[in-house]
């Protein structure tokens, strides 16, 4: 039974005659949550600590507020750690989110800077998203995972996750923040796509755009050399004539691969603690360049050291909130299996689905 700690965002009026009550701030409640949960016990004096979050995309409006991440950074410093805030590049080569430079510009646009966070920002998988440490696993689907190098090399990770729904995994919690967000492009490709790209000669106009965008010179005579392909998906992005084809995965095929990638990350570095923010729960992930309205009211913030328990509790709290009738029930995408994802994570011994919530 894993113990998790929880704070509620609702501001109980302690004294109706006083308006200045900073203890009601959810930022201050987060500080108390961090202290009471003991999650900073994973940090030792002098440790380099990654604060992993998601900056969203250009146009996203419901990512985690920078004041929450700043509070986590402050607590890392109080524990004696040296924090940096981190994210990884997205799958692809041509959009801003696909490179470290573009990712940093998006971060600034959405309010995440060294000044607002009180810590430097590093893109964990390097300039183009290929800086990684390869680890072998024995998964049903994947035999290797490419862990973002800064995640592999740091001493500890505080995983700050905006919990929301997800079109493929059903939920986007800490497992996704680790299994996708802590890996480089190669593993992001393996999560979403079943095989190497293929070029259909009957559709190919030989415009050469795929050759120009390929970072590994893997395209010769308009064929993809699998021994050189680094799985960036750039060729698909630039082909205007749909001559490049890939086999996109969906549903449980994706969520199980996310779990296997999370196993790979935690094999390289298992010194993680988790904070799930059940706020602004949208029906899609923050990598979309927009934000839909939340499907339920804000629920609260959970903290703990078990990745399976915290996502299980987050899902249960979300499902319970649906029953309140706050808004019409938002169904999961029909082809997803979030409970199956959690079961598979438990099967791979990433954690337990049994938990106890301590309300602060």
Image: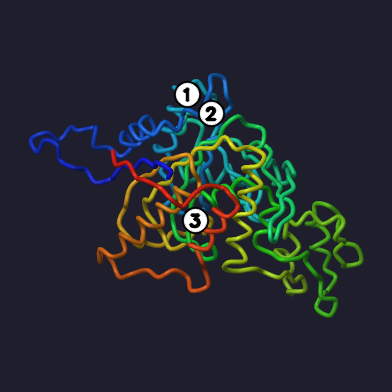
Q: Residue at x 56, y 30 (%)?
A: 49
Q: Is residue 58 above or below residue 11?
A: below
Scheme by which the image is coloured: rainbow
Residue 83: mark: 2
Direction from residue 301 to residue 146 in the image, left or right: right
Q: Residue at x 72, y 53 (%)?
A: 138
- Where's the N terminus, which quadrant? top left
Q: Which residue is mark 3?
A: 172
- Do the residues bearing badges 2 and 1 touch, measured as CB atoms within 8 Å? yes
Disc 3 crowd rating (10 Å Cα; few below 14, some 14-19, many 20+) is many
Q: Which residue is mark 1?
A: 77
Q: Residue at x 51, y 57 (%)?
A: 342
Disc 1 crowd rating (10 Å Cα; few below 14, some 14-19, many 20+) is some
Q: Is residue 242 above or below residue 65?
A: below
- In the image, residue 193 lies at what x, y percent? 69, 64
Instruction: Determine the secondary structure under disc 3.
Output: strand
């Amino acid at each position: 039974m894993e113990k998790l700690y929880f704070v509620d965002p609702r501001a109980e009026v302690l004294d109706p005659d006083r308006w200045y009550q900073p203890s009601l701030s959810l930022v201050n409640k987060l500080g108390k949550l961090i202290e009471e949960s003991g999650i900073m016990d994973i940090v030792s004096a002098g440790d380099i600590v990654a604060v992993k979050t998601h900056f969203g995309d250009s146009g996203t409006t419901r990512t985690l507020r920078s004041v929450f991440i700043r509070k986590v950074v402050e607590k890392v410093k109080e524990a004696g750690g040296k924090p940096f805030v981190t994210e990884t590049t997205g799958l692809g080569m041509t959009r801003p989110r696909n490179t470290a430079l573009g990712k940093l510009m998006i971060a600034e646009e959405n309010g995440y800077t060294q000044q607002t966070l009180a810590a430097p920002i590093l893109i964990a998988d390097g300039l183009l998203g290929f800086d990684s440490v390869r680890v072998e696993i024995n998964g049903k689907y994947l035999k290797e995972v490419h862990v973002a190098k800064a995640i592999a090399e740091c001493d500890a990770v505080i995983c700050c996750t905006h919990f929301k729904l997800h079109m493929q995994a059903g939920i986007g919690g800490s497992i996704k923040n680790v299994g996708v967000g802590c890996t480089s492009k190669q593993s992001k490709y393996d999560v979403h796509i079943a095989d190497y790209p293929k070029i259909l000669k009957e559709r190919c106009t030989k415009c050469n755009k795929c050759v120009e965008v390929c970072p590994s010179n893997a395209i010769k005579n308009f064929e993809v050399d699998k021994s050189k392909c680094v799985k960036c998906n750039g060729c698909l992005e630039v082909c205007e004539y749909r001559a490049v084809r890939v086999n996109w995965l969906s549903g449980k095929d994706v969520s199980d691969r996310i779990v296997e990638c999370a196993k790979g990350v935690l094999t390289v570095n298992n010194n993680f603690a988790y904070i799930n923010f059940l706020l602004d729960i949208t029906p899609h992930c923050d990598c979309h360049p927009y934000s839909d309205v939340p499907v339920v009211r804000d629920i609260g913030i959970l903290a703990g050291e078990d990745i399976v328990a915290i996502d299980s509790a987050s899902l249960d709290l979300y499902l319970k909130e649906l029953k309140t009738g706050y808004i019409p029930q938002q169904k999961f995408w029909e082809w997803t299996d979030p409970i199956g994802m959690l079961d598979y994570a438990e099967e791979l011994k990433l954690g337990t689905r049994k938990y106890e919530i301590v309300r602060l």
